């Protein structure tokens, strides 16, 4: 193409949204990506149905070193704006739970919609384009790729984070930020299963596939959602959520039966069903396999009538206040997003432009803004992409 006004590197959700909005403003946009397929993260999300936003998206549902940074973008382009876009394209959707919105059919409908919007905005989009170097001279960016050199006035980095490397995740965006003097906060996997060692790992393996509704806490933060035992440790929505807050060495507290006082329950069984085995009594509150595992781990078995209240209290605490110390996480391989990244202190919250480098923008997951599980991270992609698209 002739010299574009804007080059956007990265054709995920944020990059596509930015390209659409810039193109609609009459900017000549060149959107490039190193991958063979478009927006793989959208395609595989939500079990292939894409949890594209959340009706409860608000600043409090995002983590950042500066919790106020996301406010401007989320206000400029809300979840209702994206829902309106979905509806204009007649994409059927439904609310699953907790405000999570999914396509009725395939996530490919979202990708097709974004590509159609790009086409209508005269965006030039090229896949399998590798960026070899970026330079800045005479108020212009010089991008050298495997397709040759190209210059532009505005450059947008929408290359995502380190999560799910098998679909092409890389540290490219962080390297560009450092090249131009921006600070990059040390990253970590987020929305990721937690792993354990020794005895606890063996218990998790034995219970693999079993799930319960649980409340999981780390410090002052708690989430009440499903918990899943796996052959590597613990997963499920409540664990993925807390993983964004957990740090190495921290303890997490799990209530495996948040709706019941298990000590009170066991005392009731002791009074009314004294001949009952204690694991049978406990299975009134929990799946039988889990009840048996807890009794075995605490070495408390036998008829409930023969057990002192102190032992019943020990069992109850193992259910309602189960304290565990994870060994780590499953890492970027299974993480849904990347925690931290390009320091928001070096970006304008109103435009997403770097403060010390003119016409350089960072959007989406590469930035230190991480949403909760449930469509929030896609909303950040749409909102940050929209904002940059209004200003490039």
Image (cartoon, helix red, strand yellow):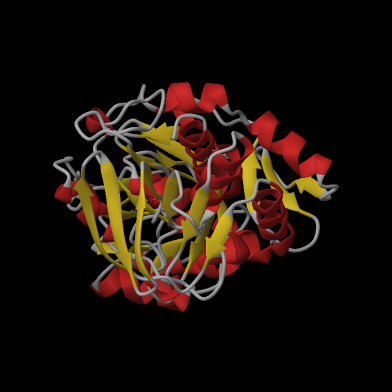
Tell me: 351 left or right of 356: right
Q: Quadrant of residue 124?
A: bottom right
Quarter of the image containing the C terminus?
top left
Question: How many numbered marks have been drawn onto this rendered protein structure?
Answer: 0
Give 329 or 62, whichever is nearer the viewer. Answer: 62
Residue name at image x 31 percent, y 58 percent = 143
Tell me: 229 left or right of 356: right
Q: Position of residue 30 (x, y in %)?
A: 49, 54
Q: Position of residue 3 (x, y in %)?
A: 43, 52
Tell me: 66 left or right of 160: left
Q: Position of residue 304 (x, y in %)?
A: 50, 57
Q: Quadrant of residue 99?
A: top right
Residue name at image x 22 percent, y 35 percent = 357
Tell me: 372 left or right of 26: left
Inspect this view and state whether residue 202 appears: yes
Q: Position of residue 353 (x, y in %)?
A: 33, 32
Outermost residue, front direction? 2
Give 59 or 119, whichever is nearer the viewer. Answer: 119
């Amino acid at each position: 193409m002739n010299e574009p006004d804007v080059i956007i590197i990265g054709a995920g959700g944020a990059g596509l949204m930015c390209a659409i909005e810039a193109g609609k403003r009459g900017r000549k946009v060149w959107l490039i990506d190193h991958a063979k397929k478009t927006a793989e993260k959208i395609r595989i999300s939500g079990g292939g149905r894409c949890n594209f936003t959340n009706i409860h998206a608000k600043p409090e549902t995002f983590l950042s070193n500066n919790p106020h940074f996301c406010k401007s973008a989320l206000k400029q382009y809300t979840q209702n704006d994206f829902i309106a876009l979905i509806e204009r394209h007649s994409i059927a959707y439904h609310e699953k739970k907790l405000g999570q919105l999914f396509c009725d059919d395939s996530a490919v409908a979202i990708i097709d919609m974004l590509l159609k919007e790009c086409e209508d905005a005269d965006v030039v989009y090229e896949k399998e384009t590798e960026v070899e170097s970026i330079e800045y001279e005479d108020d212009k960016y010089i991008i050298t790729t495997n397709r040759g050199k190209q210059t532009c006035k505005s450059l947008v980095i929408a290359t995502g984070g380190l999560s799910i490397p098998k679909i092409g995740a890389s540290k490219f965006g962080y390297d560009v930020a450092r090249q131009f003097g921006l600070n990059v906060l040390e990253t970590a996997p987020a929305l990721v299963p937690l792993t354990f060692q020794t005895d606890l790992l063996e218990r998790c393996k034995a219970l693999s596939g079993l799930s319960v509704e649980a409340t999981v806490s780390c410090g002052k933060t708690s989430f009440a959602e499903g918990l899943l035992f796996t052959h590597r440790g613990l997963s499920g929505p409540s664990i993925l959520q807390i993983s964004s807050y957990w740090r190495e060495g921290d303890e997490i507290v799990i209530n495996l039966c948040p709706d019941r006082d298990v000590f009170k329950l066991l005392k009731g069984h002791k009074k009314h069903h004294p001949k009952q085995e204690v694991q049978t009594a406990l299975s009134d509150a929990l799946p039988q396999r889990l009840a048996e595992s807890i009794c075995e781990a605490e070495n408390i078995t036998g008829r409930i009538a023969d057990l002192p209240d102190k032992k019943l209290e020990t069992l109850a605490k193992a259910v309602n206040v189960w304290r565990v110390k994870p060994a780590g996480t499953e890492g970027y391989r299974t993480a849904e997003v990347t925690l931290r990244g390009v320091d928001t202190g070096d970006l304008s919250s109103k435009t997403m432009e770097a403060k010390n480098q003119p016409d350089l923008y960072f959007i989406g997951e590469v930035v230190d803004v991480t949403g909760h599980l449930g469509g929030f991270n896609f909303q950040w992609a749409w909102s940050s992409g929209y904002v940059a698209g209004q200003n490039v």
